[in-house]
Image: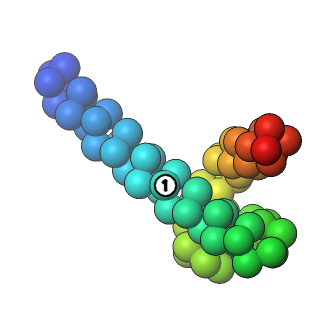
């Protein structure tokens, strides 16, 4: 594969990652608004995203919303 193909594949991977992150963020926010504790299980049931992928981003989601809650 040449470099043009590799950069194209990386761009596709990045786009897919962003879509999944956005989906997880939206589901996380919806669970918070419903006064539910967002867990990996609930995110999986709501989004049908694989647990491995949820585990990859779950810590980041928790930290982002904990900081927002602390700062008001």
Q: In which quarter of the image is the C terminus?
A: top right
Q: Which residue is drawn at 80% across and 38% down?
A: 71
Mark 1, Cα crowd under 10 Å, few <14 / some 14-19 / many 20+, is few
Q: Residue at x 61, y 78 (%)?
A: 46
Q: Position of 22 compared to 54: left or right?
A: left
Q: Which residue lies furthest to the front in this view?
A: 72
* Residue labelled with disc 1: 22
Picture layout, residue 56 above or below residue 6: below
Of residues 34 and 17, the one nearer the viewer is 34
Q: Where is residue 5 drawn, in percent x and y?
A: 17, 30
Is residue 39 shown to the viewer in this render? Answer: yes
Q: Where is residue 14 drawn, in percent x and y?
A: 37, 39
The number of numbered badges drawn on the structure is: 1
Q: In which quarter of the image is residue 41?
A: bottom right
Q: Which residue is drawn at 85% across and 41% down?
A: 70
Q: Residue at x 69, y 48 (%)?
A: 61
Q: Quadrant of residue 45?
A: bottom right
Of residues 29 and 13, the one nearer the viewer is 29
Q: Which residue lies furthest to the top in this view?
A: 3
Q: Quadrant of the N terminus?
A: top left
Q: Where is residue 36 drawn, in percent x and y?
A: 81, 75
Picture layout, residue 8 above or below residue 36: above
Q: Quadrant of residue 44?
A: bottom right
Picture layout, residue 52 above or below residue 31: above
Q: Position of 69 compared to 18: left or right?
A: right
Q: Where is residue 66 drawn, in percent x and y?
A: 81, 45
Is residue 50 shown to the viewer in this render? Answer: no
């Amino acid at each position: 594969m040449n470099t043009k193909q590799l950069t194209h594949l990386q761009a596709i991977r990045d786009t897919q990652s962003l879509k999944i992150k956005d989906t997880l963020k939206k589901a996380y926010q919806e669970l918070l608004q419903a006064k539910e504790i967002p867990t990996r299980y609930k995110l999986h049931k709501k989004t049908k995203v694989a647990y491995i992928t949820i585990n990859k981003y779950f810590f980041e989601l928790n930290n982002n919303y904990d900081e927002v809650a602390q700062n008001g």
